[in-house]
Image: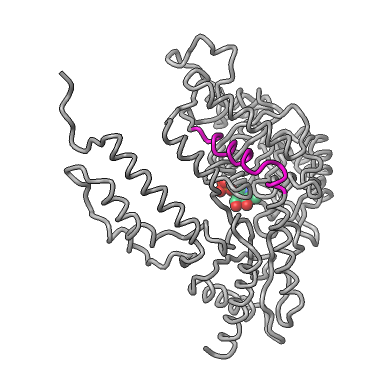
Amino acid sequence: MSTPPLTGDLSPAEFRTAAHAAIEWIAEYLESSGQYPVRSRVRPGDIREALPPSPPVRGEPLEAMLRDFISTIVPGITHWNHPAFFAYFANSGAYPGILGELLAAGLNANGMLWITSPAVTELEQVTLDWLRQLMGLGDGWFGEITDTASVSTFYALAAARERTGLDVRSKGMAARSDLPRLRVYCSEHAHSSIDKAVIALGLGHDNLVKIATDTQFRLRADALEAALAADVAAGYRPMAVVPCVGTTGMTSIDPVPEVVRTARRFGCWVHVDAAYAGVAAIVPELRYVLDGVDGADSLVVNPHKWLFTPMDCSVLYTRDPQSLKQAFALLPEYLVTATTSETVNLMDYGIQLGRRFRSLKLWMVLRAYGRDGLAERIRHQCELAREFAGMVHFEGGWELMAPVTLSLVCFRRVPPGADEAAIAGLNARIMERVNARGAVYLSHTKLGEQYTLRLAIGNIRTDRQHIALAWRELRAAAAEIEGGA
Ligand code: PLP
């Protein structure tokens, strides 16, 4: 006798109906994402208040959830899929990637071991090898997918720490008189994920040395050399250097070949943070962004930033997977399988045991667009950035704040005679006014002490009209504020 239906049971037919409705909604949403206010207009607590404080006792129909999703949840979404999303590093979930996510959810496979879903491990390895080839890197890189660049960098520095031979894995770092103070080096414009990795690895935030940059915001190799030499003389042990290809603030590109040469002389691991810009190397004329990276020990690139792959998908490559394994591999009896010794088991290369099937969406993106389609899109976005920079450059009272290396433009309004404080205040107001209006969404940073607006292009649906819209919005906001409105 079979079990009687349980509360909330769904028939396959009900699932089909609800799934079709959800796909219809997604398709319509993506076609019309430009109609939404880019930045959510809710106030803190609004969404929470609109939701029941306690869970339902009886199961509810899927249609009710879809209705509430549309009426209650979507207003609390800031639309990263909007073609005029220009804040942070803009991204996009393209159709093939969305399908990959859907299929992965359908399979719900866990690739913790090779045997727990051989395709999860092997597709990840093949897809990452394709991506390596697309970016023009040499052979000999081992790749794995993580959720974010922050985690990829944490893993890379954990491997670097293990390679020091100080056996931190077994002995820890506390109360050890034999342990020199380990140091990590990056530019003053490096991303805060480097700081967090250093903190989380117990190296001590004070041991992250920020190196000065040149007039183009690139790490100065001579300053790195001087810092390394001074630290060795003072008894520190340099552990790793993290150059960045495409810094968050202004997409400057550190001189990786020189950094690698210098770091090698001091026995350091080199981890390249190319979270946003690494994929630009798919474009033949931009391949130079990864010059010298083949000489590094590890590299992070995020397909979920500029390769049209839905969140989340970060890729960590290393030339020294043994050190990564040395940092993380553990084999309790319940995870021993007949194929343990002959297969890659991705649980050995990081903290996480469970592993979702992220490579499926990346594989589908790479196949759907192919090398040429990806390159065309990235190239086009760089052209749009140059066009926008041209508009800023040729208009009196506005200035560019950094070279436009890729698809990010740093700029600001500079009324004649205004001092730094007034310029900062004015630009903050311009940005807030534009963002509140909802047609476009920008973010800001500080370059040195100078308040700077950022227009980051990365959405697959962004085109010329969205750039023009951003420029109209910015000029209108500036005119209103300066006119006293
Ligand atoms: N590195 C760089 C250069 C970044 O710009 C970012 C985020 O924008 C990160 C690392 C962190 O990325 P994630 O959010 O994947 O941790």
Whether residue 192 is visible to the viewer of this picture, yes or no, is no
Across and down, in percent, residue 338 comes to 51, 9
Does residue 205 appear left or right of residue 61 in this picture? right
Residue at the far bottom in the pictured view: 483
- Asked which colour scheme the image uses, the reply is one colour
Q: Is residue 471 above or below residue 140?
A: below
**Residue 477 picture quarter:** bottom right
Residue at the far top in the pictured view: 338
**Residue 10 picture quarter:** top left
Question: Magenta region: which residues?
Answer: 357-375
Give 81 or 99, whichever is nearer the viewer: 99
Across and down, in percent, residue 81 comes to 52, 56
**Residue 421 picture quarter:** bottom right
Q: Magenta span has 363?
A: yes
- Residue drawn at (23%, 54%) of the image: 52
Give 356 or 64, whichever is nearer the viewer: 64
Across and down, in percent, residue 401 comes to 72, 68
Q: Magenta span has 34?
A: no
Across and down, in percent, residue 449 comes to 67, 68
Does residue 3 appear left or right of residue 450 in this picture? left
- What main secondary structure does the magenta stretch of the protein show? helix
- Residue drawn at (65%, 42%) of the image: 301
Give 294 or 390, whichever is nearer the viewer: 390
